[in-house]
Image (cartoon, rainbow, N blue to C red):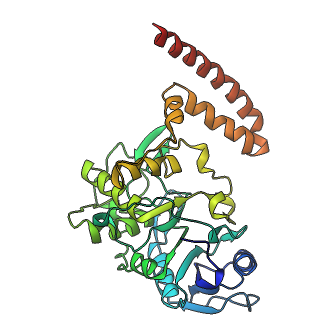
Amino acid sequence: MRKLNSNSISVIIQGAIEYGITRRCLKSIRKFLPDAEIILSSWEGAKLDGLEGLYDIAVLNKDPSAVIFDDSDKRLNNLNRILVSSKNGIAKASRKYVLRLRSDLELKNDNILKLKDDLPERNPAASLFRQRIFAYEIFSIKYDTKKRIRQRMLFHISDWCYFGLKEDLQEFFNLPQVKEPDFSRYFENQPKSENDIHQTRLWKMSPEQYFTSSNAAKVFKNLKFDNYLDITPENVGISEDFIINNFRVFSQKEWGISTLKKEYKDIKMYINSPFVYYSKIEQLHDYKKYCNISAIIKEGEFTKKMYNIQYYDALRKHFFRLLYGRLAKKFAEFFSVVFYFYLFLSALIKELLCRKK
């Protein structure tokens, strides 16, 4: 994909309207994508006062509502809302390309025009879309971690924003709404593994997993992914194969997009191991495995060796938190860095001595 002009893009702003946040979102699009068509897709009764001139088309949908999926903090599953507002907004798009954004995101520059699919090969048998859809890094994960316990998460590509051909985004959202409350309260009546790190979650799967796995099932007819704990070797393979052939995940910095929601401000995916989310290293690994076995992949070899040394992961994580974390926590992080540096250095020396023997 060559560098685009914004006049070839329809931008779909999807979700609830919060005046200050939504206004910043729309203004950033007008600033950095001045010739784009802007479609605001929200709910009936939404107040658009003060947003005049910042969008071209308003689509006010009937709200399908949302159901609580986690009783511990009353969290709502907005899956059907995301589906309805995205699908109906994209239907109004008149341009070749579509950028679909949450209404609480903000463009910081025009990087979107420069993004390119730098993975040239695809397996036609695993490809649903004409071109790879570009996806966001935050919550595009292979594993979820809680209290140092790592759990596999299949088909988990972020639903914060997507960019691609209009026809591909239409196909992606060409899905039925889920039946509620059965979907969001699924594990209320089904047994759950004691090893699940999310014991309070009742939903069948996250919206990210529903969207991605449902599209994967259009290609992999034998796919049986019943819920987010349905982690089999076959499903792991299909998840990786479908994702690398149909998506290219870019970082926050590459996108030039950031969140306006306070609860997500501190999320930095690069603090995590690059092997637990769809980092560039992990995507290249899957690319070689599923798209082009002859590809020469040099990135990540040194990183893999470092992660094989005990305490490196913890040292790296606390070091990044020291650099970029909140000021109030920097004092504690400094001592954590010193502590884990000592442990890592001891492990490294032990490793080098063993190699000499």
Q: Is 263 left or right of 80, judged from the image as shown?
A: right
**Total numbered circles:** 0
* Residue at position x 31%, y 51% in the image: 236
Q: Is 235 left or right of 342, judged from the image as shown?
A: left
Q: Is 284 left or right of 11, judged from the image as shown?
A: left
Q: Is 203 left or right of 313, judged from the image as shown?
A: left
Name the foreground residue: 316 vs 124: 124
Above/below status of 167 relative to 74: below
Q: Residue furthest left?
A: 222
Q: Quadrant of residue 227?
A: bottom left
Name the foreground residue: 235 vs 114: 114
Name the foreground residue: 19 vs 259: 259
Name the foreground residue: 250 vs 138: 250
Q: Quadrant of residue 150?
A: top left
Q: Quadrant of residue 22?
A: bottom right
Above/below status of 27 relative to 327: below
Counting from the top left corner in percent of width and height, residue 326 is at 75, 46
> In this orientation, does residue 162 appear?
yes
Counting from the top left corner in percent of width and height, residue 93 is at 53, 88
Above/below status of 92 relative to 31: below
> In this orientation, does residue 184 appear?
no
Q: Residue furthest top?
A: 357
Counting from the top left corner in percent of width and height, residue 84 is at 46, 82
* Residue at position x 61%, y 19% in the image: 345
Q: Quadrant of the C terminus?
A: top left
Counting from the top left corner in percent of width and height, residue 287 is at 40, 53
